Image (cartoon, rainbow, N blue to C red):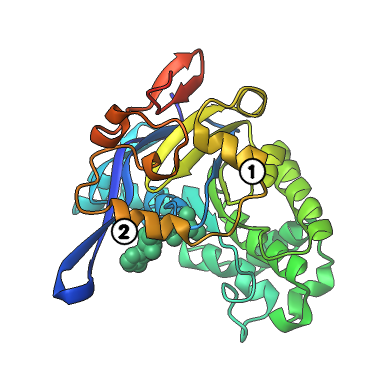
C-alpha cells in the first residue's frame, strides 16, 4: 500500500474575470498519483502548471474540489469532514511542508531554536528539556551548529535558513514531506548541498517526499520517479531513468530539450484554451497534434510497466 494515494484530485479556483464573468481556473484537474514509503516522487512542470496547488491540496492545506487523498490507507478528505478530528490531527503531524522562500516562511522575530520547536509545542510536547534536546539534534541533522539555536533568521544565509525550515518540518517526526521548490531561490552550489541534505535525511529518517520543482534537472537528481505536470494534469509519469532515457510526451521532450523558459505562455494558453477546454491541455503547443487532441483530453495510461503517458501518440 502506498503511503500517499491521490485519486482524481481536482482543485478549482473561482475568480472574477474580465467583463464580470465568473472565471474558473482548473489548477488541478483529475490528478491520480501515489508516493510510496521512503520514496521521492518528483513533480515537474512550468510555472502555473498547478504544482504548488497539488502539493498543498495533498496536505489538505487547500480544500480539494473533488477526489480523494488516502494517507496510510485512510481518506483524509473524508477525515477532514468528521467531527472527530483525531485522524486529521495525526495526518497534520505526519505530513509536513517545506516552502520555496526561506525568508518569507520563517518568523523574523523568533530565534531559530523556537522556530524549529514550534511544531512540537503545537502538538503538545511541553517538557522544555526534551524540546531543547530534540532541537539540538535536529540542528545537527541539518548541518547547523548548536549556536544557531539562539540566533534570529536574519543572521543566516539563504541556504542556512532553508536548513532551519527543513529542521522545523522534521521536528515532529513526519513520514511525508512536500518540498515545494525548496532550492529554487538558492545559488547553484548551495542547491546541490541542500539536495544532498534531503537525500541524507531520507536515508536516516526514512521519510517520503513529494519534491516539486520547475527544473527537471533538480527533480532528476533527487527523485525515484517523476511526474510531469502541465496545466492541471499529469502528462507523463515514469521512473527517473526511464523518463530521461525514453521521454514519450511531447511536453516532457520539450522540458528535456530546453532549459525551460520561465514563461507566461502557459497562462496565456490556459486562457485561450479556457471555456471549451475539453481537449488535451498541451494541444495548442504540440507539434504532433491531431484532430482528436483538440476534442477529447487523453487519459494517463500505462504504456509499458511503470511508464504512463497521457497522449494519443501512444
Ligand atoms: N489562490 C489562488 N486563487 C486563484 N488562482 C490561483 C490561486 N493559486 C494559484 N492559482 C492559479 O492556479 C494555477 C496553478 O498555480 P500554482 O499551483 O501556483 O502552479 P505552480 O506551482 O505550478 O506554478 C495558476 O493559473 C495560478 O494562477
Ligand atoms: Mg509553485
Question: Are the two marked residues, 1 and 2, in contact with CB atoms closer than 8 angstroms?
Answer: no
Q: Which residue is mark 1?
A: 216
Query: What is the quadrant of the N terminus in the image?
Result: top left
Q: Characterize the local packing of mark 1: few (<14), some (14-19) or many (20 or more) Cα atoms within 10 angstroms.
A: many
Residue name at image x 31 percent, y 55 percent: 272
Looking at the picture, tell me which residue is in the foreground, 270 or 193.
270
Which residue reaches farthest top?
Answer: 304
Q: Mark 1 or mark 2: which comes first in sequence?
A: 1
Circle count: 2
Residue name at image x 61 percent, y 50 percent: 260
* SS type, badge 1: helix
- The percent coordinates of residue 5 (x first, y second) are 39, 33
Res. 19 visible in picture: yes
Q: Characterize the local packing of mark 2: few (<14), some (14-19) or many (20 or more) Cα atoms within 10 angstroms.
A: few
Quadrant position of residue 167: bottom right
Q: Is residue 124 left or right of residue 87?
A: right
Q: Is residue 283 left or right of residue 138?
A: left
- The percent coordinates of residue 14 (x first, y second) are 22, 64
- The percent coordinates of residue 154 (x first, y second) are 72, 83
Q: Which residue is mark 2?
A: 271
Q: Is residue 193 left or right of residue 184?
A: right
Looking at the picture, tell me which residue is in the foreground, 68 or 181.
181
Q: Where 23 sits versus 256, above or below? A: below
- The percent coordinates of residue 35 (x first, y second) are 49, 33
Mark 2 near ligand 1 (CB under 8 Å)?
Answer: no
C-alpha distance separating marks 1 and 2: 25 Å
Amino acid at each position: 500500500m502506498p503511503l500517499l494515494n491521490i485519486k482524481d484530485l481536482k482543485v478549482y479556483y473561482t475568480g472574477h474575470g474580465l467583463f464580470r464573468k465568473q472565471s474558473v481556473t482548473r489548477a488541478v484537474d483529475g490528478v491520480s498519483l501515489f508516493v510510496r514509503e521512503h520514496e521521492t516522487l518528483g513533480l515537474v512542470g512550468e510555472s502555473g502548471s498547478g504544482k504548488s496547488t497539488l502539493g498543498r491540496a495533498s496536505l489538505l492545506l487547500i480544500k480539494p474540489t473533488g477526489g480523494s487523498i488516502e494517507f496510510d490507507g485512510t481518506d483524509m478528505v473524508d477525515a477532514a469532514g468528521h467531527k472527530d478530528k483525531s485522524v486529521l490531527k495525526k495526518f497534520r503531524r505526519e505530513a509536513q511542508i517545506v516552502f520555496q522562500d526561506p525568508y518569507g516562511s520563517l518568523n523574523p522575530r523568533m530565534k531559530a531554536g523556537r522556530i524549529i520547536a514550534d511544531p512540537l509545542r503545537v502538538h503538545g510536547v511541553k517538557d522544555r528539556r526534551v524540546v531543547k534536546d530534540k532541537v539540538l539534534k535536529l540542528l545537527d541533522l541539518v548541518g547547523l551548529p548548536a549556536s544557531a539555536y539562539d540566533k534570529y533568521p536574519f543572521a543566516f544565509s539563504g541556504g542556512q535558513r532553508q536548513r532551519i525550515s527543513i529542521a522545523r518540518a522534521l521536528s515532529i517526526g513526519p513520514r511525508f514531506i512536500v518540498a515545494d521548490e525548496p532550492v529554487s531561490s538558492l545559488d547553484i552550489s548551495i542547491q546541490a548541498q541542500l539536495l544532498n541534505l534531503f537525500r541524507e535525511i531520507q536515508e536516516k529518517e526514512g521519510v517520503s517526499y513529494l519534491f516539486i520543482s520547475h527544473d527537471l534537472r533538480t527533480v532528476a537528481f533527487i527523485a525515484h520517479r517523476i511526474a510531469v505536470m502541465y496545466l492541471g494534469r499529469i502528462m507523463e509519469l515514469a521512473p527517473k531513468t526511464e523518463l530521461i532515457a525514453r521521454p514519450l510526451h511531447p511536453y516532457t521532450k520539450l522540458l528535456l530539450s530546453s532549459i525551460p523558459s520561465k514563461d507566461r505562455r502557459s497562462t496565456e494558453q490556459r486562457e485561450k484554451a479556457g471555456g471549451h477546454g475539453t481537449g488535451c491541455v498541451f494541444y495548442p503547443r504540440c507539434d504532433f497534434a491531431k484532430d482528436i487532441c483538440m476534442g477529447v483530453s487523453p487519459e494517463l495510461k500505462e504504456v509499458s510497466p511503470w511508464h504512463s503517458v497521457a497522449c494519443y501518440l501512444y
